[in-house]
Image (cartoon, rainbow, N blue to C red):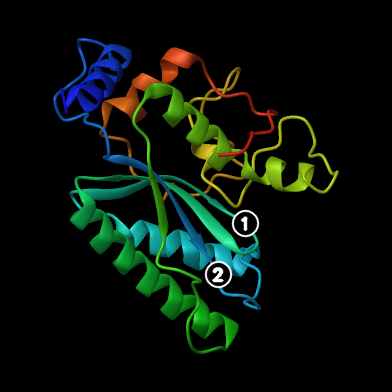
């Protein structure tokens, strides 16, 4: 049958999520979103820049859109986002990009386009995918440095991310008082981010994420 492939995929995803999965936890509402800067833009990994990024993230949250985790690298941002549908995602990201461009261009003393592209959004459809995306985003600094032959100290949590607030690390509880500050992300609403990914075990602080 023409729809048999799609039906099989849906059935497989439903089996992985489990029979108790809430009806609201449907594929597509949990996403890994990436924003990249244009060539030549100043680095984002500066404390003053981070303060504005955190503020813009905090102001971006709506009833049907929210940033659950984030990571700031030199020329791009990674985010784990929840959005009710594609239109909500588009509007939420548009608002966030406008805020970021306006604030950061003022801070950098520049004008014009700040982001290389609109944004790239990858839907996360299973607990395993969500766990992999969380590890990739929260430990992205380790990945970036490992690519150039450098390593971070044991137990390092990137202050340019939401990692110090994350409650899913193996062997850690609570937030890091020296790094965390005020949380600017939202609590997850989807089953995949609240419960599902944990079926594959907590994240390892010192793990270097693989490619996505």
Circles 1 and 2, Cβ within 8 Å, touching? The answer is no
- The quarter in which the N terminus is drawn is top left
The answer to which image quadrant residue 80 occupies is: top left
Element carrying mark 1: loop
The residue furthest front is 1
Residue 140 percent location from the top left of the image = 62, 43
Q: Earlier in the sequence, mark 1 or mark 2?
A: 2
Residue at label 1? Answer: 73
Is residue 155 placed above or below 51 in the rendered structure? above
Residue 11 percent location from the top left of the image = 23, 17
- The quarter in which the C terminus is drawn is top right
* Residue 90: numbered disc: none
Q: Residue at x 34, y 20 (%)?
A: 195
The answer to which image quadrant residue 24 occupies is: top left
* Residue 37: numbered disc: 2
In the visual, does 42 lie left or right of 132? right
Residue 109 percent location from the top left of the image = 57, 88
Report how many numbered discs are placed on residues in the image.
2
């Amino acid at each position: 049958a023409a729809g048999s492939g799609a039906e099989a995929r849906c059935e497989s995803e439903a089996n992985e999520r489990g029979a108790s999965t809430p009806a609201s936890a449907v594929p597509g509402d949990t996403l890994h979103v990436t924003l990249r800067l244009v060539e030549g833009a100043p680095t984002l990994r500066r404390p003053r820049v981070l303060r504005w990024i955190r503020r813009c993230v905090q102001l971006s949250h709506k009833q049907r859109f929210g940033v659950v985790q984030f990571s700031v690298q030199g020329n791009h941002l990674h985010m784990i986002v929840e959005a009710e549908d594609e239109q909500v995602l588009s509007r939420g990201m548009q608002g966030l990009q406008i805020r970021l461009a306006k604030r950061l261009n003022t801070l950098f003393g520049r004008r014009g386009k700040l982001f290389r592209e609109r944004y790239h959004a990858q839907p996360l459809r299973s607990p395993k995918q969500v766990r992999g995306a969380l590890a990739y985003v929260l430990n992205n600094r380790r990945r970036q440095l490992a690519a150039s032959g450098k390593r971070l100290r044991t137990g390092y949590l990137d202050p340019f991310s939401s990692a110090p607030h994350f409650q899913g690390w193996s062997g850690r509880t609570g937030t890091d008082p020296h790094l965390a500050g005020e949380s600017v992300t939202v609590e997850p609403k989807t089953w995949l981010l609240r419960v599902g990914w944990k079926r594959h075990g907590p994240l390892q602080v010192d793990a270097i994420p693989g490619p996505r």
